[in-house]
Image (cartoon, grey):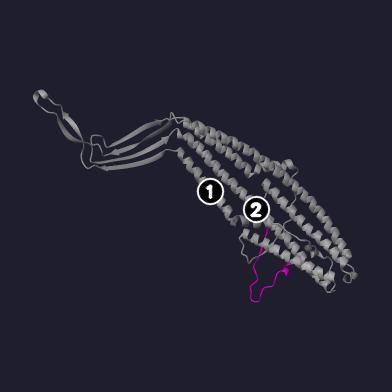
Amino acid sequence: MRSRIMVCSTLAVFYIAGIPGASLRAQQTRGTLPPGDAPPSVLRITLEEAKQRAVGSNKLLTLASMNVQGKGYATRAMQSNYFPKVIGTAIYFRFDQPLGQVLTTRARPLLGVPPTAVDVNVLNRDSSWTTIAAVQPITDLLKVRQGVRLARADEQIAQTEYDKGLRELLSGVEQLYWGFLAVQRIQAGAAQGVQGAELLARTQLLEARIALVEARQGLQEANRQLAGIEEQLKNLLDIAPSTRLELVEPPLPILTLHDADEAIALALASSPEIRAAELDIEKAHAALAAEKVEYLPNIVVMGGYLNQTAMSYVQQDSNFVGVMGSYTFVDWGKRRNTIRERQNLIAMASLKLQQTRDTVRQDAAKALRDLQDAAEALKMAQELATVEREAAKKAETPEAFKNPAPLIKASKDAGLAAVALVKADLAYREAYVKLMALIGRQ
């Protein structure tokens, strides 16, 4: 988010200096309330309070925070796979007829005795099995370890997204805050310019009447821009539209960095983009290690308790322990090609990390250079505004009401210089905000 101030040349008449009766009161530009209406509430808020309010009310940032929390739950869910699972099973069957026969005597042909068979249930007609067992995969523990690495990386990536969103939000609030103050200063100058132009217009000279029209146009433009920025700021801070904002102007920030190397080092150390790229590499390595486990046999250890009523000739209660193992001998190249894919992802993630670091270096160096240029431009704008104000003051003579052209020209030049000073001040503050966002010092 960037607040942009579009100032036309007519705003130069805002600072008609030295005209008797001119007053620097921006509140006069606001319309009066109709009789019977309650005055709007006023909220006085500092920059830090605005930032805190924006963080607390921003829904997208809240969603990002909830995403971090959700990824944390996923990590703990994956960690639970380190421990054996306790599984209970209950089975019941009711058969429609007895099951099985048992041969009791052999046939004796010489004696004429046929074989005999007795119906005996191999499984009872009412059969049940109840099992409680602890199952612990052994080989899969290696996969679980990599799964935990993946889950933790996802959690940390979600945190970097939150940090990135927080930086953008704070940067946007600060730029809107300073943009509001800048337009408010221009609006105050516009009100002063209108008052001064009205005094000159009493002479009925053409130049003075033109100056008055231009001043009123400039005031209207300033009011429009101020209303737009105020609406954006209120929406961002979740403030009622009827509330009137009263901002506390912070002092001009001072750059404390010594050189570009320091700025680049701080940016590299605090960049959420770099951290996310590093975590992508971590995820790729974990996925590769998990895939290599597929070459190992799958071993599972279990133990538990069995209660059965299916076989009356077997004890009803028993305990057991066991081991199961399996191995895939032929998978037609699936494991080999999957490993190659994981290795390719690692190479891609490493290249992305290098590219991200290069981008952060370039952005940090450019942001510092832009801030230094903005500081020089602000210094020159201050010097020019001082000179132009002196020239406008010098043009204020008793003959100005008879021949206002020199005063109007000098005042226009002073107004242009004053507007340029406001814009230079805002440009410096915006450049400072951008650099602080890059190095994580907001």
Q: Nearer the viewer, residue 266 or 318?
A: 266
Residue 218 on the magenta segment: no
Figure quadrant of the N terminus: bottom right
Q: Residue furthest top?
A: 110
Q: Residue furthest left?
A: 111
Residue 39 on the magenta segment: yes
The image quadrant of residue 365 is top right
Q: Which residues are magenta?
A: 24-46
Mark 1, Cα crowd under 10 Å, few <14 / some 14-19 / many 20+, is: some
Residue position for label 2: 170
> In this rendering, would 319 be left or right of 33?
left
Asked whether residue 56 is in view, the answer is yes
Q: Nearer the viewer, residue 354 or 276?
A: 354
Q: Residue 96's spot in the image, x, y percent? A: 22, 43
Q: Secondary structure at mark 1?
A: helix
Label 2 amino acid? Answer: Leu
Give above or below for 110 relative to 347: above
Q: Residue 165's spot in the image, x, y percent? A: 61, 50
Label 1 amino acid? Answer: Gln
The residue shown at (70%, 42%) is 362
Q: Residue 52's spot in the image, x, y percent? A: 63, 55
Of the image marks 1 and 2, the number of the one nearer the N terminus: 1
Q: Secondary structure at mark 2?
A: helix
The residue shown at (76%, 61%) is 8
The image quadrant of residue 134 is top left
> In this rendering, would 374 be left or right of 58?
right
Asked whether residue 196 is in view, the answer is no
Q: Residue 441's spot in the image, x, y percent? A: 68, 48
Residue position for label 1: 69
The residue shown at (52%, 48%) is 70
Q: Main secondary structure of the magenta part?
A: loop
The image quadrant of residue 279 is top right
